[in-house]
Amino acid sequence: MRHATIIGTGSYLPDNIMTNDDMARLVETSDEWITSRTGIKERRISTGETTSDLAYEAATRALSNANLDAKNLDLIICATISPDSFMPSVACIVQERLGAINAAAFDLTAACTGLIYGMAIAASFIESGMFQNILVIGAETLSKTLDWSDRSTCVLFGDGAGAVILSASDQKEGIMSITLASDGSKQDYLCLPAIPLSNPFIEKGEDVIKPFITMKGQEVFKFAVRSITDMIKKLLSKANLSHNDVKYVIAHQANQRIIEVAAKTLGIPNEKFFINLDKYGNTSAATIGIALDEMVQKDMLQPGDRIILIGFGGGMTSGAILLEWS
Ligand code: UT7
């Protein structure tokens, strides 16, 4: 049977570091509050690079890591909630810059679960035999979506991009199992409005819709813990494995406390959960790709290691992938 396996990873973060102390000069907050409630110490904030710039850099590094020519890509998927424009898509901009002339390209919106949804779609295309090589990118410039006077949200997020290249393999390694879910009844937990309806048939209202992220923090926290615990149980039972058979879990990097509560509930040691949110904050669709690439750069993954990737976010959406590293 054809499997989808990861043959390359890449990531890119803007150079500009914004620390918690920098944040405390903007809003009524402190390093102590942000660190103790979230684990975040600093984040990267773009000083001019767009989402497609970050996506392109991460994609270039993933191609080089995979030793693959861009012309061999069949599909580019970019997961983002902060595209440069509704059209062209970030994926099409990246396709042109990479010279990936044989690739189809589109963006997808599943918020912080975007990379997992993208990898699931890519795996299906590969397993069906339709495509051989697929680039999946998670890229965000969330700094442009933040109300910088709202301390309850602006301290949490950052900019960045992560990318993976999935390829067809006849070996048993690669993606073993996937679970995806959505719960639209919780759509008001995390919101980022787009262009409001406006045409000659609509009376102009007084309300000005602000293009900023709003969030019901505690509700999201509970949803996140439930998603991580439920999905890990589901994936492991589907594969007839226990958590002892898994080397690492890479959960969406939103809040260290979310990960610790989930780990405790599942009885999995904290050390199995990779954490880098202290350096980058929550970069939405990008966190899992950035984390995975950091682990690859640090040589933490060996062939045969089983790892779980888990995302959760606006929509609400959630998804997880169990894979064997090759
Ligand atoms: O990709 C998914 C994205 N979102 C998330 O993952 C968010 C999930 N939720 C969380 O991570 C947590 O709910 C937060 C970190 C957002 C908030 O932590 P919390 O422990 O739930 O705090 P809270 O909202 O209950 O607020 C506690 C206090 C409030 O003050 P009062 O009412 O007790 O006086 C807030 O006004 O902390 C205050 N507060 C802050 N204080 C200093 C809220 N934000 C800040 C801040 N600095 N940045």
Image: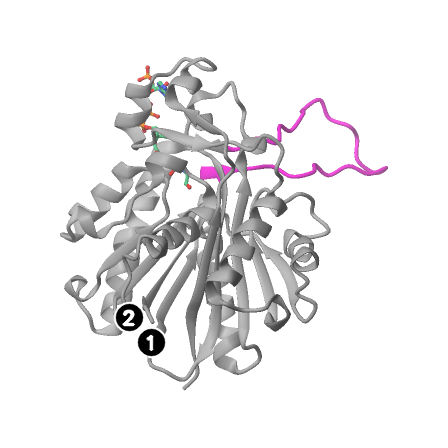
Quick one: 76 or 254, which is closer to the camera?
76
Name the spot of residue 7 as percent of width and height, x first: 44, 68
Name the spot of residue 295 as percent of width and height, x first: 33, 53
Question: In the image, what residue occupies the spot 42% across and 49% down?
Answer: 290
- Ligand 1: quadrant of the figure: top left
> What number is the disc on residue 219?
none
| 72 in relation to 147, above or below | below
Residue 68, picture quadrant? bottom right
Can residue 138 be seen in this snapshot? yes
| 167 in relation to 320, above or below | below
Question: In the image, what residue occupies the spot 66% across and 65% down?
Answer: 100
270 on left or right of 282:
left
Sequence-first disc among 2 and 1: 1
- The reply to whether callout 2 and callout 1 are in contact (CB within 8 Å) is yes
Name the spot of residue 242 as percent of width and height, x first: 17, 66
Q: What's the residue type where badge 1 is placed?
A: Glu
> What number is the disc on residue 173?
1
Q: Residue furthest right?
A: 200
Residue 202, picture quadrant? top right
Can residue 314 be seen in this snapshot? no
Quick one: 175 or 318, which is closer to the camera?
175
Whether ligand 1 has any atom under 8 Å from the Cβ at mark 2 is answered as no
Q: Main secondary structure of the magenta part?
A: loop
Write down the residue under mark 2: 303
User: How many discs appear?
Assistant: 2
* SS of the residue under disc 1: loop
Q: Which residues are magenta?
A: 188-213
193 on left or right of 178:
right
Question: In the image, what residue occupies the spot 49% across and 59% down?
Answer: 62
Quick one: 15 or 50, which is closer to the camera?
15
Question: In the image, what residue occupies the spot 56% across and 37% down?
Answer: 192
Name the spot of residue 191 as percent of width and height, x first: 52, 37
